[in-house]
Amino acid sequence: MQMPKPSEADKERFRSVVPDHPDVVVKPMFGNLGAFVNGNMFAGLFGPTIGVKLSETDKADLESSQQTQPFGPEERPMGGYVGLPEGWNDHPAEAEPWVAKAFAHVASLPAKEPKAKAPKKKV
């Protein structure tokens, strides 16, 4: 599976639409970026595509009114996420309210419990 690499402009566009909130953490994921709240990803960058995790109502609204796309690898898109319209790449202000809706939705979900660390092997 070939992982697309976002350009620096893609990364900056992604960061510009992510809410400026103290609970938001943006971190690298497989050469791309993910935005998290309470340990759960609410938005991600896969190549030039921004994907968001919306409530079912918001997802249906977005998909019925815009040309969305799958989010993630073509052969295995990420379930529950929708890729924002490609045309919005030149208009980040179009994406911003949807990323904010994704943040609000995922922030309302239970926090993800951190994985227990594996015990260190003795050498």
Image (spheres, grey):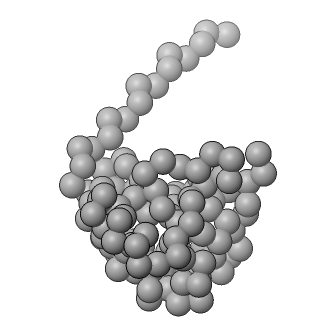
Residue located at (48% from left, 62% from top): 82
Q: Quadrant of residue 6?
A: bottom right
Q: Quadrant of the C terminus?
A: top right
Residue lying at the far right of the rendered structure: 2
Residue at (53, 76) in percent of width and height: 67
Please indicate whether residue 99 sits to the left or right of residue 82 in the image. Answer: left
Residue 83, relative to residue 118: is it above or below? below
Q: Which of 14 and 102 lies nearest the eye of the viewer?
A: 102
Q: Is residue 120 above or below residue 6?
A: above
Q: Is residue 98 left or right of residue 15?
A: left
Is residue 65 in view from this perspective? Answer: yes
Whether residue 45 can be seen here: no
Q: Position of residue 74 (x, y in %)?
A: 68, 53
Viewer-side residue, 101 vs 22? 101
Relative to residue 76, is residue 16 depicted above or below?
below
What's the residue at 43%, 69% (across, down)?
63
Determine the residue positioned at 35% across, 79% down: 97
- Closer to the camera in the image, 63 or 110: 63
Residue pushed farthest top?
122
x, y percent for residue 75: 68, 47
Residue 106 at what x, y percent from top left? 30, 56
Quarter of the picture containing the N terminus is top right
Say if 61 sits above or below 78 in the image. below
**x and y, in percent, of residue 118 in the image:** 50, 20
Give whichever of 67, 88 is nearer the camera: 67
Q: Is residue 7 left or right of residue 63?
A: right
Q: Is residue 26 left or right of residue 20?
A: right
Q: Quadrant of residue 122?
A: top right
Number of labels in the image equals: 0
